[in-house]
Amino acid sequence: MEEPLANPAALTPAQRRQEIAAILARGVLRLRNMAQASPGLGSSRTAEESAESRGNRLDDGPETSPHALAR
């Protein structure tokens, strides 16, 4: 694993992008490892379960949403 840089404020834009890419890559690898270690926890929803859950939504859309913009 790479050593963190002493002063993040002194990073160039390219170094910042590299650091962000490294952080994201470690997260993706961790997520993949977790999924491989426990395959039963993955998303294995069937189409029927997805359709069933659509009926249980809290918000039906912009017509009934309290977050919709006033017209």
Image (tube, rainbow, N blue to C red):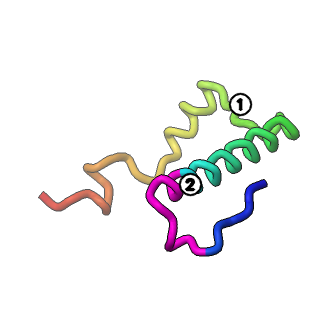
Looking at this view, is 39 or 67 the one in front?
Answer: 39
* Residue 17 higher or lower than 44, as above or below: below
Kind of residue at badge 2 = Ile
Furthest residue toward right: 37
Q: Which residue does the image show at 68% across and 50% down from the upper left?
A: 27
Residue linked to disc 2: 20
Examine the structure image and report whether residue 28 is included in the region drawn in magenta: no
Q: Tell me which residue sits at (58%, 33%) in the image.
A: 50
Q: Residue at x 71, y 31 (%)?
A: 44
Mark 1: which secondary structure?
loop
- What residue is drawn where x is 73% and y is 44%? 31
Give the main secondary structure of the magenta stretch: helix
Q: Mark 1: give few (<14), some (14-19) or many (20+) Cα within 10 Å.
A: few
Percent coordinates x, y for residue 11 in the rendering:
51, 65
Is residue 9 shown in magenta? Answer: yes
Mark 1 residue type: Ser
Q: Quadrant of the N terminus?
A: bottom right
Describe the element under mark 2 as helix, strand or loop: helix
Nearest the eye: 56 or 10: 10
- The location of residue 59, given as percent across then percent down, is 40, 52
Q: Earlier in the sequence, mark 2 or mark 1?
A: 2
**Which quarter shows the C terminus?**
bottom left
Identify whether 57 is placed above or below 69: above
Whether residue 10 sits left or right of residue 36 in the image: it is left
Q: Which residues are magenta?
A: 7-17
Residue 70: give x, y in percent of width and height: 16, 61
Q: Which mark is residue 68?
A: none
Residue 56: image location, x then y, percent = 52, 46
Q: Which residue is mark 1?
A: 44
